[in-house]
Image: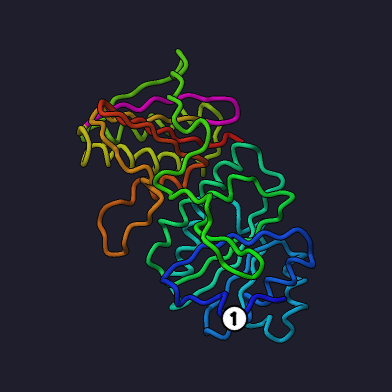
Amino acid sequence: MPVQPERASLDSGPFAHTAVAYGSDEDFLRVVPGLVSGGLREECQILVVTCERKLDLLSGALGEDARLIDCRPSDRWYAHPVRTLAAYHDYVRQRDRTMIIAEPRWSGWTGRQAREWIRHESVINTTFAGLRTAVWCLYDRTTAPRDILRTHPSRLEADDVEPSRLYVPPERFSLPGDELPFTDPPPAAVAVAFTPELLGGLRRTVSEQARRAGMDRNLIASLVLSVSEIAANSVEHGAGHGQVTLWPQGDEFVCEVTDPGGGLDDPLAGYRPPEPESQRGYGLWISRQLCDRLEIRSSPERVRIRLYMSLR
């Protein structure tokens, strides 16, 4: 039985995030066209992101209604967790009422990549909070990681939306290893101090060390901007000075920014986009999008932020 229109309603709140598990093409076609039809009845702008084969299946099931929805192939949409988060956020902010039906491509990712995409699913709950949208996340039971069930406040079960007993709010969500301390930089790492007067020299040092490590010039520009944003944030809002440590590590280049001011209490720092009129809050948000990965360890004595950029 297809999902009834009221199952896709946005009336229960400004934002809803629901896991939709399926196990076959028949399951997919039993549920997804009903969600789309319900959203169209409510005059939502609908974005569907999944593999091209399932987009074709959905188009055939919807008939003429297929032209009323936006469709994006998942292999291109799900390229970088925080850039994808920003793209979804921009899509929703630019429209009045939206529905997103999406399926990440879990196959083909390394364990580390899968971890970041699981975290992406968790932080959606805070990034989209208060926005008028419903997000239905499709998961093939045979390929999706079990931790995904901890990232959704609700689940679609037997055509009914039910609260998820496994859900963990994003501010408390963690994955194994999240709390482990950073390992020490290697002895050959290059360390450079920064103050307000030394930020220009810091940018030059980061650029030179990344070039020596073999990084592409376009990636160097992104890395320099990221390090500069975080160091400037430390100057303005932290201790006023700090240190950047740089070293190649396998096929990555690592930059660690250390602020001796300490006290970064927000576990979701850099995952919430700043308000459009805000003059602050852009440093970590920009850096998370520009770099392949960003990790934070905070204590009362210092904050350590590591930026990772691929050399390949």
Left or right of residue 302, residue 121 in this image: right
| Secondary structure state at the residue bearing disc 1 | helix
Residue 29 figure quarter:
bottom right
Q: Quadrant of the N terminus?
A: bottom right
Q: How does the figure colour the protein chain or chains?
A: rainbow
Q: Nearer the viewer, residue 60 or 82?
A: 60
Residue furthest to the top in view is 187
**Residue at image point 29% right, 38% down:** 264
Give the residue type at disc 1: Pro
Residue positioned 27% across, 41% down in the render:
233
* Place of residue 32 in the rendered image (x, y in percent of width and height, measured from the top left): 67, 71
Instruction: Quadrant for the C terminus, please.
Output: top right
- Neighbor class of circle 1 (other Cα within 10 Å; few <14, some 14-19, many 20+) is some
Identify the magenta region: 241-252
70 w.r.t. 233: above or below: below
Residue 283 place in picture, x, y as percent = 34, 47
Q: Which residue is mark 1?
A: 5
Look at the picture and state if 95 lies above or below 294: below
Q: Taking 82 as reference, is 97 above or below it?
A: below
